[in-house]
Amino acid sequence: MCEDMRRWIPFLKTPPTVAVVRLNGVIGAGPRGQLNDQTLGPILERAVRRGKPRALVLEINSPGGSPVQSAMIGSRIRRLAEEKEIPVLAFVEDVAASGGYWLAAAADEIYADDNSIVGSIGVISAGFGAHVFLSRQGLERRVHTAGKSKSMLDPFKPEKPEDVQRLTALLEQIHASFIRHVKTRRGDKLENVPEMFTGEVWIGREAEKLGLIDGLGHMMPVLKEKFGKDVKLRRYGLRRPVWQRFGATLAQDALAGIEERAEYARFGI
C-alpha cells in the first residue's frame, strides 16, 4: 500500500519519513556549476512540501564554488525549514569545503565521516597571465574603457598592484560575509581558534572538536537513532536533461568535468 494512501487510514501507523536532497558537485551558475539556486530551488521546495517529512536531510559532497549561489541556496534552506518548522540535518561525505561548508552550515546539525574534509572558510580568486606569451608572438593587447576602473586584472596585460589591491578588498568583504554566516549558524558551538577562518581545513574528528560539525556518523544510523528504526527516506536530486545524457554537449561536459576535478584536487581527493 502506498504511503499517501496509508496516511488516510487512521488505524494504520505511518512510519516517519524524511526528505533527502543530495548536494553533489561544484556550486555555481551555468555549465560549470552543478549546484545553483535556480536548479535546486524547485527540488528543495518539493522535498519539504510533499507529505509531512519529519526532517530535511542534506547529503553534501562539494568542494565549494560561487559564494553568491552558496548564500542563495543556504538562505532558501533556512526559509523552508522555518516555514515548515522542520529540522535540517547535513551529512558530509568526502568534502564540505568553502561553499560546500556554507551549505552544511545552513543545517541545524552537521555530521561527517571520520575522514571527511571540512572547513576552508575563506575566499579564492584564481586566474592566469599570458602577456609574456603574447609579446613573444608579436601580439599586442588593446583595451579601451570609459571609466578608469572598468578593466581589472586583464590576463593579457601585466598585473597592476592597484588591481590586486582592489580585488583583495572585494575578497575580504565576501570573506567577512562567510564568517558571519558560520558564526550565526554555529554560534556557541564554535571553539575560539585563530585558524578557524583562515581557509584551513580539518578532518572529521578534529572538525568535531572545533565545533564545525556536531558529530561523527553516517546518515542511516543517525536517522534511525533520531526517528526510529522504521524511518523512511524520500530522495530528491538533480537529473541531467535527456539531451545531455546522450552526449549532445560532450565537449562542454568534458571541460566542466576537468574544472570540477581541479576543485576537488585542491583537497587531495
Image (cartoon, helix red, strand yellow):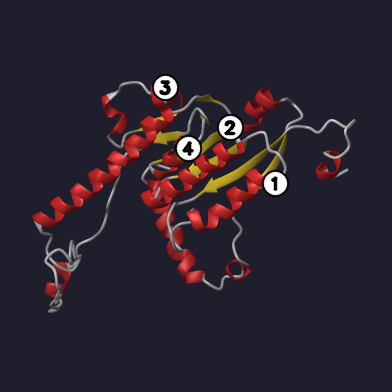
**Residue drawn where x is 72% and y is 25% of the image:** 228
**Residue drawn where x is 60% and y is 34% of the image:** 85
Residue type highlighted by circle 4: Ala
Secondary structure, mark 4, is loop
Residue 226 at what x, y percent from top left?
65, 24
| Marks 1 and 3, the one that precedes in the sequence | 1
Residue 123 at what x, y percent from top left?
30, 45
Query: Alpha-carbon distance for marks 4 and 2?
Result: 11 Å
The residue mark sitting in front, 1 or 4, is: 1
Q: Is residue 218 left or right of residue 136?
A: right
- Structural crowding at the residue carrying mark 3, measured as other residues with C-alpha within 10 Å and reported as few (<14), some (14–19) or many (≥20): some
- Structural crowding at the residue carrying mark 2, measured as other residues with C-alpha within 10 Å and reported as few (<14), some (14–19) or many (≥20): some
| Marks 3 and 2, the one that precedes in the sequence | 2
| Quadrant of the frame with the N terminus | top right
Q: Is residue 267 left or right of residue 107?
A: left
Residue at the disc numbered 1? 50
Residue type highlighted by circle 1: Arg
Query: Alpha-carbon distance for marks 1 and 4?
Result: 21 Å
Query: Alpha-carbon distance for marks 2 and 1?
Result: 15 Å
Q: Is residue 79 left or right of residue 187?
A: right
| Marks 1 and 4, the one that precedes in the sequence | 1
Residue at the disc numbered 4? 106
**Residue drawn where x is 45% and y is 39% of the image:** 96
Residue at the disc numbered 3? 189
Query: Alpha-carbon distance for marks 3 and 4?
Result: 14 Å
Frontmost residue, 260 versus 232? 232
| Marks 2 and 1, the one that precedes in the sequence | 1
Residue at the disc numbered 2? 87
Residue 90 at what x, y percent from top left?
54, 35
Which numbered disc covers residue 192?
A: none
| Callout 2 touching callout 1 (CB < 8 Å) | no
